[in-house]
Amino acid sequence: MTILTPPPSHPGPHPTATVSDGGDGSPAEVPGRTPRKGPALVLAMLGVATIGFSDIRLAGWTLSDALFVMTAGVVITQLLTGRTRGIAPASMRHSPGLLLVGSIVMLSAGTLSSLWSYDPGTSMSVVVRYGWLTLAWFWILRSVVPNRAALVALVQWLRAGLMISSVAAVLGYLGIIHNAANLSGRQAGFFSHANGLAGYLVMGLPLFLLGVPTTWTDPPKSIVRTRLIPSAIVVLALATTGSITAALAAIVGAGTAGLLLLTKGRGRRRQRNPLRNMVVMLVIVVALLALARSGTQLVERFTEFTEGRSAVHASASYRERGASFVIGQFDENLVLGVGFDRETAGIDITVGDQSYGAGGSGIHNMIFKMYYEGGAITLFGFLLILFGTLQLGWHVIRATIGDDLQNLAIALVASVVSLNVLAQFQPMGFERFYWLPVALIGVVWAVRRQELQEMREAREAREAAGVPATNGSNGRNGRNGMYGVNGTR
């Protein structure tokens, strides 16, 4: 690999961070031009854009999964044939340590739990799905992002998919379009249930609040077009789902992003016009007042809850009964669980005069669900993945001080936090949007590690040639080499 120039010290993506013949004889990229997107990246971009279209199936596969299977085929074919242009180098495809260990522990214990379940075949199919998400899917996303430009493209298409789902929900609320999956007027978008859309929007909201990655342009795009308007549409769409817990999770996510924005060492902030700040705050207050008087499903359900009406209280009691059931069985799952098939994990929950034959889905707390079905060891592996993700996200935030890449890392960490708040009220283990920010934190980590490595090699080459160091090599980005190419101290 021939490095022509290291990534810039100023914020923003470098159009050609690395120039390589890929070892396959293909021509190098021309400096100053945006690198062409390879077929694997294009398929992955479509895959992340269609994560919210879970009701659209191809031969039983979700549209997103089908696209990612094709992406995997392209990546593997390119690696086997040596035509690796557009594919991340081997060092970037490696899984972060704790995430890999956590996945192996979770899948191994899940397999053992499946062997003594009522239906081992069905239970093993669930374990395979977890393996596809935490091993194969994570690897695919790291493989198709060799540089920052590819990362920008991937996140832009994710934003596009989120905006399509948000607009569809708002149009459904206004009565312009109709979705048969709607429950009591709650908008579900392209999901089979409103809670699915709510979780998807909770995941994406921090990306819009922080305006990434569309602010990575020179000059930066308008804050109104990149943050305020898209965020308002997503918040309104979230309100149409009627999910009170999703609203709580969104608030936690926004608060997490705000706290991380105060990270020590973020550098000198630009002076902002105080009048503009006052206008922005006024717009937010007016928007909240309008939402409170809008009569959306969220407002209606919150009103029902505070007034003690039966429908919402039955939903809350349903979740409470599921959690109580798992706590009552606590000592029976200290090592392995009952398995992931519905027959073994069947729970018959009765609330009032209504009975729910819900199977394992009767447990709406993801921690309790993982413990009951997979056992304590499976839960330990799952928590190890979450801990490793948050730790890695924090290291990436610290390793991108003074760089716009930090805002993306902050948004992804906020998404992980908010989704896991929501996961305490509804299980999301199979939802692609639940695992996406976890995967993308690993991608950002790989991209930043590669940039630091390239800057280090460029600096050593200049020193060997006796060329004086420039501000670009010893500036803020160069200083972040103290965190090491692995993103750790």
Image (spheres, rainbow, N blue to C red):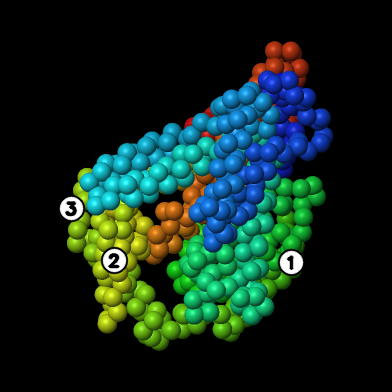
x, y percent for residue 213: 68, 50
Residue 324 placement: quadrant: bottom left
Q: Secondary structure at mark 1?
A: helix
Q: CA separation, marks 2 and 3?
A: 16 Å
Between circles 2 and 1, the one closer to the viewer is: 2
**Residue on which disc 2 sits:** 322
**Left or right relative to 130: residue 28:** right
Residue type at tag 1:
Arg
Residue type at tag 2:
Gly
For residue 332, the mark is 3
Counting other residues with Cα less than 10 Å from the Cα at mark 3, is it few (<14), some (14-19), or many (20 or more)?
some
| Above or below: residue 176 compared with residue 59 | below
Q: CA separation, marks 2 and 1?
A: 48 Å
Nearer-N-terminus badge (3/1) = 1
Is disc 3 in contact with disc 1, using a CB cutoff of under 8 Å?
A: no
Residue 82 placement: quadrant: top right
**Residue on which disc 1 sits:** 276
Q: Give the residue at x 31% y 58%.
A: 342
